[in-house]
Image (tube, helix red, strand yellow):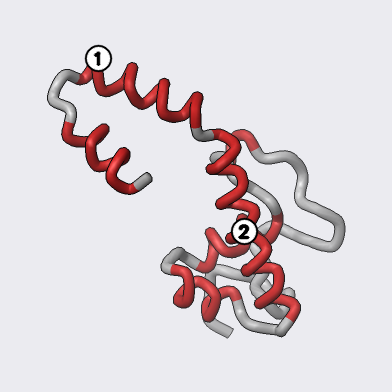
Amino acid sequence: MFDALKALKAMEDPQARAHAISEFLREQPGELQELKALRRDYVLARRAEKATRKTIAEEIGVSPSTVQDIELGYSGSGRTRGPIGKGKQRGTTDDGGPSGGKA
């Protein structure tokens, strides 16, 4: 899959590249969803082990906020997200305190 992505990025004609990307995405939705599910399974397992979002983020190479999004099942932009799941509030840290500042 990485080779296919590299080949798509290397295409010089923007229209041809966009068309090829559309074809690629049409053929890959199941695999992409499966990969997202596998990554989410890992995040949920680590959270069940009481690992912090920061630790998990470092392990899988994403930001802590992305780990939170994965944990909550979000995959789109903030504009497309539904309400937070029960017991979850926006802007809280792992311990339930407010985010965005030092304690």
Secondary element at tag 1:
helix
Above-or-below relation of 17 to 33: above
Q: Is residue 44 left or right of residue 78?
A: right
Q: Which mark identifies residue 15?
A: 1
What is the quadrant of the C terminus in the image? bottom right
Above-or-below relation of 60 to 34: below
Q: Position of residue 3 (x, y in %)?
A: 28, 45
Above-or-below relation of 17 to 95: above
Q: Which mark identifies residue 34?
A: none
Density class for disc 1 (Cα within 10 Å; few <14, some 14-19, many ≥20) is: few
Secondary element at tag 2:
helix
Q: List the residue tagged with mark 2.
A: 38
Identify the residue at horizontal 64%, vertical 53% (top origin). Answer: 37
Disc 2 versus disc 1: nearer the observer = 2
Q: Position of residue 85 (x, y in %)?
A: 81, 53
Q: Quadrant of residue 6?
A: top left
Identify the residue at horizontal 62%, vertical 62% (top origin). Answer: 68
Q: Position of residue 24 (x, y in %)?
A: 41, 28
Q: Quadrant of residue 31?
A: top right
Q: Is residue 67 left or right of residue 60?
A: right
Q: CA distance from mark 2 to mark 1?
A: 33 Å
Of 95 and 59, nearer the camera is 59
The mark nearer the N terminus, 2 or 1, is 1
Q: Are marks 2 and 1 in contact (CB under 8 Å)?
A: no
